[in-house]
Amino acid sequence: MGDRWHVEVDRSVCIGSGMCVVTAPGGFALDAARQSHPTTPERDADEQILEAAEGCPVEAITITLADSGEVVFPPED
């Protein structure tokens, strides 16, 4: 069984570029205020979700392991 992820979007940082929606269709959606949110906050590990987080121009997307809270993205300095 693979990892389970918890996906969050920091709405105070999100600029509504929509890159996450394009990169991971079905993984993210923009609301009426053009703020992104994950369609399923807890999900199986997914390469498209990781690519969306990596491609976010303001790094508003955080991915952690659902069971331990260990950070998957962004990498810690």
Image (spheres, grey):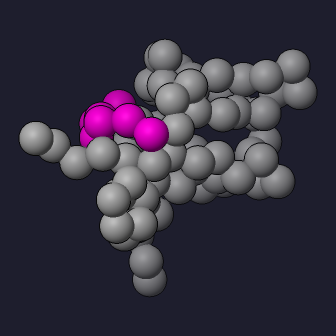
> Magenta stretch?
42-48
The quadrant holding residue 45 is top left
Q: Is residue 52 magenta?
A: no
Residue 13 in sight in this render: yes
Residue found at x 45% / y 48%: 6
Quadrant in which the N terminus appears: top left
Q: Is residue 48 above or below residue 57?
A: above
The quadrant holding residue 13 is bottom right
Q: Position of residue 33 (x, y in %)?
A: 89, 27
Q: Is residue 44 magenta?
A: yes
How many numbered dots are placed on residues in this image? 0
Which residue in the rendered view is the most extreme toward the front?
Answer: 67
Residue found at x 44% / y 83%: 77
Q: Position of residue 24 (x, y in %)?
A: 45, 25
Q: Is residue 16 left or right of residue 49?
A: right
Which residue in the rendered view is the most extreme toward the left?
Answer: 1
Residue 57 in sight in this render: no
Q: Is residue 34 above or below residue 77?
A: above
Q: Is residue 13 left or right of residue 51?
A: right
Residue found at x 30% / y 36%: 44
